[in-house]
Amino acid sequence: MTKIRSGATRSTPFFFFLLLIAGAAACSAPQAASTPQPPPAPTTVSVAPTSASAAPTSASVAPTAAATATSAQPKPASGGTLIYANSQKARSDSMDPATQSGLPAGQAVWLLYNQLVYFDPQKGAMPQLATSWEVSPDGKSYTFRLRTDVKFHDGTPLDAAAVKFSLERTVRPELKGQQAANYLQAIYVSTDVLDASTVRVNIKNSSTAFLYQMSRQIFGIVSPTAVNQLGDAKFALNPVGSGPYKFKELVSGDHVTLVRNPDYKWGPAAFINSGPAYPDQFIFRYLPEITTRLAALQTGEVNFIEDVPLQDVAGLEKDPRFKIYKKAPAGLSEAIQLNIKKAPTSELAVRQAIEFAINKEQINKAVFFGYSTPTYSLLGSPDMLGYDASIGESLYKFDQAQARQILDKAGWTLGTDGLRRKGDQVLKLQFITDTTSQVEELVQAQLREVGMQVELTRLDPAGAATAWKKGEHNLTLGSGGIQGRSNPDAEIISTAYTCSQVGTFNTSQYCDEAFDKQILAAVAIQDNAQRAAAYKELQKAILSQALSVPIVQYTKIWASTSKIQGVNLFDPGGVYIRLNGAWVQP
């Protein structure tokens, strides 16, 4: 058994892949044209963010500490070491953005590399390596104009050829990339180098989420020279990017050390500090045990931790030695997925009864200590485009009497042992999960109250993925690990409810080609209001079929010592806390 959840917090093993339905089965991308043609006339010139690219996510919560309530923020100071304790073991040591897996590596990758654009949750895509970009009339070509002063850590220039190299390398099947490849292979066509500082990326279908995807850490631009000299495997352990920190040391299973890049001056203008970072070193420690991580913070062994034990949050908030940071990740809400291919959840009546029988308030109080929010929405954040909790609330509210009535009407009669039967068949559900939280036990008990027998099986991620692929489950917690995935746009629905994802993230096994086309059309809509309306229709279709039981909008919580200053950024999805401007007060 692999422990994926510590205490009451949900980790997100990076099964967090970004898969769109268009061409998701593609194994490789076509080669770029040998002689680039002039780009089509642009419809959008983006020095400032475009309205089409904006996809708001949940607002970050300012850090809380008694010590900062009345005092002004001190002036940033250079020097010192920031030691960040991760809540997960590294699933791989790779710090190659194209192959990195899991949150520990991802946190370091943010500091090692730069991306084409920076994405602000409220303003959309903003300049980073690209100073501006143009979008073709059909939405299938993006022409980026790059900064000309950027250098990799090995001293080589970051130019259009490096961008082309990075993107085309990502979709190579032999690289065995995960999140990045799975997204890009679904949508990528080619990259054309128009000149040393201009590159055009061609995609299969218009997607308003494309610029957001290009802002993610998994699409950091790598040094072609370093990759060619070292080879893919060695590069993953000796990464060379252009970010504010350079790689120094990796001790597998223990820590990663990064050192300050003194030449850095090309951070996004939106950052408070777009120049050289402040701490001399960043050390990422792997401390998956929740009590060990908290003790390390309290003793000063580390000065920043993630996934704070929920029972300790209130005490830390009152202690002036510490700061608390909270964020509701965008993506899908914490939910139970229902397999429509395996009896008895193949019956709509059974699935609807489950919707009514689960007490979300009880789960939030018992498991999440009230820090998350009970929800009827498929989407994990109220600020996501297309969010509308009233859709689910109008269909299902906690009502055990309604659940019993539905089952009675469907022919599932209650026996003297408290279990329901239809003929000789007991209403028995297989609940297969890769987490170790109390959510599963509470769901098991709640469904027992209306006459359903739930057999709970916990497996490691690989074993659970195999069982889900075979369809051995009736219930899963989450969509094959998608929960909390960093994506502020509701196109995330495509990862959990489309035909191409049956056997992977579509653990409900739902497949409707017309619905697939509806998702593809929604993602391509440029007008935000129209796209939001389309997303709401998609959610209504999913919930009316009772494919998912949303439980809570999960809140991720971090803590630091009060000497850590300048922490004011999260990634757009709320999964990572951005530490680019952080500094250690002497």
Image (cartoon, rainbow, N blue to C red):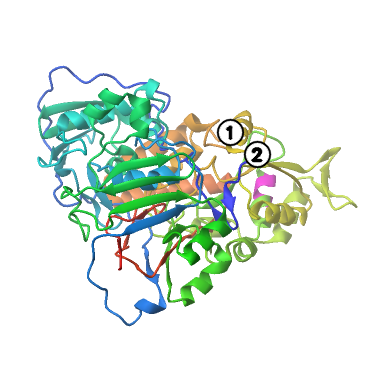
Rate crowding at label 1 as few (under 14), some (14 to 19) or many (20 or more) other CA atoms within 10 Å: few
Residue matched to label 1 = 462
At 72% from the left and 57% from the top, the residue drawn is 446
Residue 295 or residue 442, whichever sits in front: 295
Residue 294 on image: x %, y %: 52, 62
Residue 554 on image: x %, y %: 50, 58
Q: Identify the residue at the far bottom of this view.
A: 70
Residue matched to label 2 = 459
In the rendered image of this protein, does residue 378 appear above or below residue 564?
above
Residue 28 on image: x %, y %: 35, 21
Tell me which corner region of the image, top left, top right, bottom left or bottom right, holds residue 112: top left
482 sits left or right of 432 in the view: left
The stretch in magenta equals 349-353
Residue 545 or residue 78, whichever sits in front: 78
Residue 406 or residue 101, whichever sits in front: 101
In the rendered image of this protein, does residue 204 appear above or below residue 456?
above
Residue 251 or residue 213, whichever sits in front: 251
Main secondary structure along the magenta-highlighted residues = helix
At 42% from the left and 60% from the top, the residue drawn is 304
- Asked which secondary structure carries label 1, the reply is helix
At 13% from the left and 49% from the top, the residue drawn is 47
In the rendered image of this protein, does residue 230 appear above or below residue 442?
above
Q: Are marks 1 and 2 in contact (CB under 8 Å)?
A: yes
